[in-house]
Image: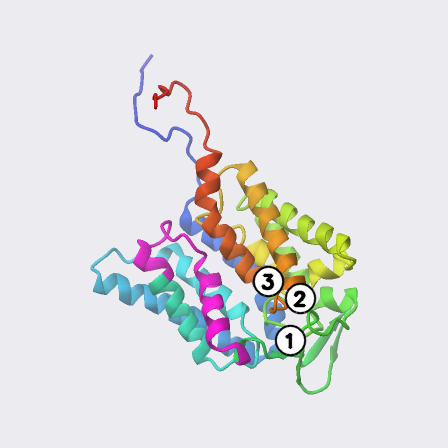
Amino acid sequence: MALHISTGPHLRSRQDTPSLMRDVLIALCPAVAASLYFYGLKALWILLVSTACAVLSEYVWQRLMKKPIRLNDFSAAVTGLLIGLNMPATVPVWVPAIGSVFAIIIVKQLFGGIGHNFLNPALAARAVLLTSWPSYMTKALVPERTLTFGLFESSVDAITSATPLVAPVADIRNLLMGNIAGAIGETCKIAVLLGLIYLLIRGVIRWQIPVCMLGTVALMSWILGKDPLTAVLSGGVLFGTVFMATDYVTTPMLKVGQAIFGVGAGILVVLIRNYGNYPEGVTYAILIMNIVTPLLDRSLKRKVYGEVKQNG
């Protein structure tokens, strides 16, 4: 009998960064398809520019710094696509372009590249864009076409409108189908739910953060006299929960920490929405919890079997 000795980790998985990022891209496909259907060439141009700028920024940085080119891990493409999906259809294309460059260079690469950033790059870029150009980032567009159960219908010419968080006139059906004003990737909740189901089935994400975050938003909204289902389906709560609050790098490692992360993000969303000057709080809620993540990991750190306890 041969005895093989090796260093840890001893538990191995077939999953690697490229496979995980490919799964995220696949999970985003329904949201991309919905954005193209609702907003047409406006959405296509935004998504192409944001994704291309993210990939190009990473390539140029790695070449200038003489680092290995890691475009094949698809992480830059995911970041760029997420930034594009968080844009309203009326935004000038230079806005998502700046967001992608900022996300890759400032938030990701300056901190050491993938796995070292302490904030979600796409969300950090969105926060900067919201602060810098709020008139562009909050000017939502009503879809040019509407989607109904079993039928695709033409609608009136596209017009700008307040989101349901500002003017809550949309019913549950329209919130689900995406017949509302908002960012191009977050309006159709059915598309986002399809992505969530895919990521859960593939084991890319765990249920703790989505369930705890959405459950907290619903519960606190109900306590404050709001309709919990409308609160969950309005704005970017669902999209942010599924695709950005579950980021591996910026969320706790342990399940209990992920549950606390979800609850904390949900509480912050409701507080910002109801007591802040900004109608949507998802971006800042998740970013704040990103900052708290190292504290959660440290306080919930597991004791290693056989570890010698140090005095003092």
Return the residue found at the far bottom: 157
Q: For the stretch drawn in magenta, what is the main secondary structure?
A: helix
Residue 127 included in the magenta stretch of the image: yes
How far apart marks 3 and 1 lie (CA) works out to 24 Å
| Element under disc 3 | loop
Which of the image's four quarters has the C terminus?
top left
Which of the image's four quarters has the N terminus?
top left
Q: Which residue: 49% across, 66% down?
A: 127
| Element under disc 2 | loop
In this picture, residue 267 sits left or right of residue 171:
left
Picture coordinates of residue 242, whole percent (x, y): 58, 54
In this picture, residue 242 sits left or right of residue 104:
right
Return the residue found at the far top: 1
In this picture, residue 245 sits left or right of residue 51:
right
The disc label shown at residue 188, or none: 2
Residue 203, quarter of picture: top right
How far apart marks 3 and 2 lie (CA) works out to 19 Å
Badge 3 or badge 1: first in the primary sequence: 1
Q: Which residue: 60% across, 42% down?
A: 208
Contact between marks 2 and 1 (CB within 8 A): the answer is yes
The disc label shown at residue 38, or none: 1
| Element under disc 1 | helix
From the image, tell me which residue sits under label 3.
281
* 141 up-or-down from 219: above or below: below
Residue span colored magenta = 107-135
Q: In front: mark 3 or mark 1? A: 3
Residue 68 included in the magenta stretch of the image: no
Nearer to the camera, 303 or 8: 303
Picture coordinates of residue 214, whole percent (x, y): 66, 51
Picture coordinates of residue 135, whole percent (x, y): 54, 80
